[in-house]
Amino acid sequence: MTDDDEHRLARVTELAKRRGFFFAANEPYGGVAGFWTYGPVGAALKRNVEQRWRERFAHEEGHMEIQSPTIIPEPVFEASGHLDDFTDWVIECPTCETSYRADHLVEGTGEVEDAEGLSASALESLIDELDISCRSCGDSLQGISVGEFNLMFSTAIGPGKGEPGYLRPETAQGTIVDFPRLLEYARGDLPFGAVQIGPAYRNEISPRRAIIRVREMTQAELELFYDPEEDEPPLGAVAAVELELYPVEAQEGDGEHRRLTVAEAVDGGIIDNPWIAYYLGVATTWFHEIGVDPAKLRFRQHLPGERAHYAADCWDAEAYLDDDWIELAGFAYRTNYDLNKHHEYSDGSYTVFKPYDEPVTVERATVDPDMAMLGPEYGAAAADIASALEALVETNPNAFETGDAVTIEAAGETHEIALETTGYTVETVTESGEHIMPHVTEPAFGIDRLVYTLLEHNFHEDVVDGEPRAYLELPPTVSPNVAGVFPLVDADGLPERARALADRLASAGLPITYDERGAIGRRYRRQDEIGTPFCLTVDHRTLEDDTVTLRDRDSTKQIRVEMVEVPEVLRSLRSGEMSFEAVAANTEAVDREGNS
């Protein structure tokens, strides 16, 4: 990290704490790593980011929004694979018992850029080769084993030992497990999407970098369910959007990014899944609109070894922060993995009936296991054997065509079942449709990381009137307040007029703040630091002609606006319908002292 990066990181972190964006939680008790409290302006910024996401990925896309529990029973995660596969590699110092995430230790040496997808043995070899020591006590970690650590927080549901459950590590399973009910709300039609914005929990081995890597986070996720054979995204709407791509072949080859439009990336086979391509295009425009620096944004494809157990492909949106690339969002093609698992493990049906244009006559293999024979012979395993036979005839009916018996796996054992007991037959049937298993593409955003990125990408320092100034160039649509309202001085009835204006704007639903303390220049600086895009000053001229001064944060220019027009002007500025320059073009300009 360069000196400039360190200075910027220190200034942003100091600003965040001092001005109430975020700070470590439970500080009077020493705090616990990975938990943060959002202060007044931080909570407002975070809430605005969530609302902009909701507007773009739910409302504009026509998707439903749900809110599922944050505690989920264990069988759901057994089916989804999270009990076995939602893990990180951990290494513990035998001297001081401090635990570390092994890939982070390796990356921290600067010798390896990305160690996340490496195996335990590969990480152990690198730790030995690089002679990595414990950061706490300094003892060598050579020869220490790297093990798996499940990141889910466990809990008990109910009194006593209760039913085992987990705090959800993502909102996805809460959406996917309820697919049968959501399909009803979608009237059985594909494609449809369901979004959630809410907390998720991961018992991170080594939380770090403020709200970048935490144990409690807010996620905004969309699960899109569709027929991969028929449902296509509206790629034309984003075809010309340019993407900064870092595909697998570049990571394993020349290391260069690929600057391509969405259409070029799809046509060239760089992005295989068209729904991922569509959402990369949508996300690129949205990121830019809320204040992510386009020059510091890329989409990196997961290497085969780092993909989640459910993903056939995944691309991460990454922002350049503090001399490093940080994941902001993941765009995963989950295929039908999750639905298939819940269909297998639960009592629900996770298929969709797809009608044919015309009925068709087909030969269909079926079984009707004779439980009167299976029960006495196999006891408690009989039901599992019957289910295995039904599954086998669907996937491999030819297994029943040869010999006098079929081989199946059930109840953890291999069984030879006499053909006559299976009730196997082939029937000619007329079918009006078929049941299909939808596929899922998932854009998943980390709201906390987005908040930090907006602070870091929009933090600037300059000099105004010979004095240094720090300000956040946040777009009005996400800034905590759209305007600060001030009386020029605390006299002559100006505070009363300013408070009345502030009350009127608040009643109109505009987020504003009122401040009458200190010199006017200091009040401007306070608002600049928290990203307030505009300031309204009530002065002595207001008493004469009912106009106020409207100041722009970025240029520090000032204009006069009719008091009666202020709510509509602010509303237009906040929504982006008008720019400050457009308003100024038809308004009287004034200098910083308020003179025309």
Image (cartoon, rainbow, N blue to C red):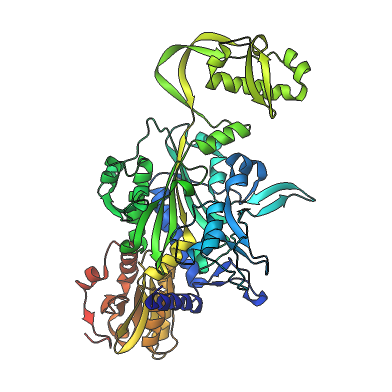
Give the percent coordinates (x, y) of residue 393.
57, 18
- Count of all numbered marks drawn on residues in the image: 0
The quarter of the image holding the C terminus is bottom left
Q: Residue at x 24, y 85 (%)?
A: 591
Q: Nearer the viewer, residue 54 or 539?
A: 54
Q: Quadrant of residue 426?
A: top right
Residue at point 78% right, 51% down?
A: 159
Locate residue 101, reporting x and y percent. 57, 60
Residue at (35% x, 64% y) in the render:
291
Depth check: give the residue in front, 555 or 122.
122
With respect to residue 508, does 463 lie above or below? below
Q: Position of residue 207 (x, y in %)?
A: 56, 65
Q: Is residue 137 visible?
A: yes
Instruction: Report the residue at 21% width, 74% height from top.
Output: 587
**Residue 262 image position (x, y, % from top left):** 29, 47
Position of 145 relative to 536 (above/below): above
Residue at the far left: name it.
585
Q: Quadrant of residue 127?
A: bottom right
Q: Nearer the viewer, residue 453 or 304?
A: 304
In the drawing, does residue 307 fall left or right of residue 138? Answer: left
* Near-viewer residue (120 or 369): 120
Can you name the residue that lies furthest to the right here?
Answer: 160
- In the image, residue 109 sits, relative to residue 538, either above or below, namely above
Instruction: Classify the position of the N terminus by image quarter.
Output: bottom left
Residue 478 can be seen in this image: no
Task: Give above or below for 267 relative to 521.
Answer: above
**The quarter of the displayed image where residue 497 is located:** bottom left
